[in-house]
C-alpha cells in the first residue's frame, strides 16, 4: 500500500456489493437489452466486473466527461470529452458511475441523455458521497456511501494514479 493511503472498503466487500447490484439490475432489465453507459475513466473496472455478473443480453458504451482538471475538488465546469457510439433513442439506458460526489457531472449527463429520447434512464453508482452533493441526483442502484474523504482505487484515481488498487482507499 502506498504511503498516505488507508483502506476504506476491502476488495471482498466490493465483490459482494457488485454481485448484489448485478442481481438487482438483471431483475429489473430482463428482456430489455439495456445499454450500459460507463463514465470514463473511473467506471471502467466497476463496469467490467458488473457486466460479467449481470450475465444477460446487454450492450456497452462509454462517454468521457471531466470536471476535475487534475485537482481534488470538482471545478463545477463539465466538459464532454468524448461522445457515445451507440444510439440512445428508444433504449433503456443504465449509466454506470464510480462515484457520485457533487452530482454535477452526473446531472449534466442525465440531462444530455434525456434530450436524446431514451425509453428510460437509470443510474448505478459504486459509491456516493452525499455530504458533498450540490445537486439532487436520483441513484437507482447504489453500492457504498462513503465519508467526505478523497477516495482512490478500483478505477477511481487522483491525477491518473491509484486506479489499479483492488481496495477503495482514502488519501490522508
Image (spheres, rainbow, N blue to C red):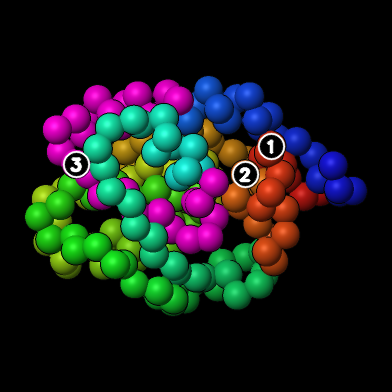
Instruction: Measuring from the top left, give residue 89's x and y in whole percent.
Output: 12, 61
Q: Using the rendered view, name the quadrant where residue 30 is placed.
A: top left
The residue segment tinted magenta is: 19-45
- In three-dimensional space, the C-alpha distance between marks 1 and 2, rounded to whole angstroms, equals 6 Å
Label 2 near label 1: C-beta < 8 Å? yes
Categorize mark 1 by other alpha carbons within 10 Å: few (<14), some (14-19), many (20+).
Answer: many
| Residue at 49% over, 37% down | 49
Instruction: Measuring from the top left, give residue 143's x and y in whole percent.
Output: 48, 33
**Is residue 1 shown left or right of residue 117?**
right
Q: Which mark is residue 154?
A: 2
**Is residue 148 shown left or right of residue 88?**
right
| Residue at 32% over, 26% down | 24
Q: Is residue 82 above or below residue 55?
A: below
Q: Residue furthest right?
A: 3
Categorize mark 2 by other alpha carbons within 10 Å: few (<14), some (14-19), many (20+).
Answer: many
Q: Which mark is residue 167?
A: 1
Residue 69 inside the magenta-drawn segment: no
| Residue at 48% over, 30% down | 18
First in residue order: circle 2 vs circle 3? 3
Q: Using the rendered view, name the quadrant where residue 42 is placed.
A: bottom right
The residue pinned by badge 3 equals 33
Amino acid at each position: 500500500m502506498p504511503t498516505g493511503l488507508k483502506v476504506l472498503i476491502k476488495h471482498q466487500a466490493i465483490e459482494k456489493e457488485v454481485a448484489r447490484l448485478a442481481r438487482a439490475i438483471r431483475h429489473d432489465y430482463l428482456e430489455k437489452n439495456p445499454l450500459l453507459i460507463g463514465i470514463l475513466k473511473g467506471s471502467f473496472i466497476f463496469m467490467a466486473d458488473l457486466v460479467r455478473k449481470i450475465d444477460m443480453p446487454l450492450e456497452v458504451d462509454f462517454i468521457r466527461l471531466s470536471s476535475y482538471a487534475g485537482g481534488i475538488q470538482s471545478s463545477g465546469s463539465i466538459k464532454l470529452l468524448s461522445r457515445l457510439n451507440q444510439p440512445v433513442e428508444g433504449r433503456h439506458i443504465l449509466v454506470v458511475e464510480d462515484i457520485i460526489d457533487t452530482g454535477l457531472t452526473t446531472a449534466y449527463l442525465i440531462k444530455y441523455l434525456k434530450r436524446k429520447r431514451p425509453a428510460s434512464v437509470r443510474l448505478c453508482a459504486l459509491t456516493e458521497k452525499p455530504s458533498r452533493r450540490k445537486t439532487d441526483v436520483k441513484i437507482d442502484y447504489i453500492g457504498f456511501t462513503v465519508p467526505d474523504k478523497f477516495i482512490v482505487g478500483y478505477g477511481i484515481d487522483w491525477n491518473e494514479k491509484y486506479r489499479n488498487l483492488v481496495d477503495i482507499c482514502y488519501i490522508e
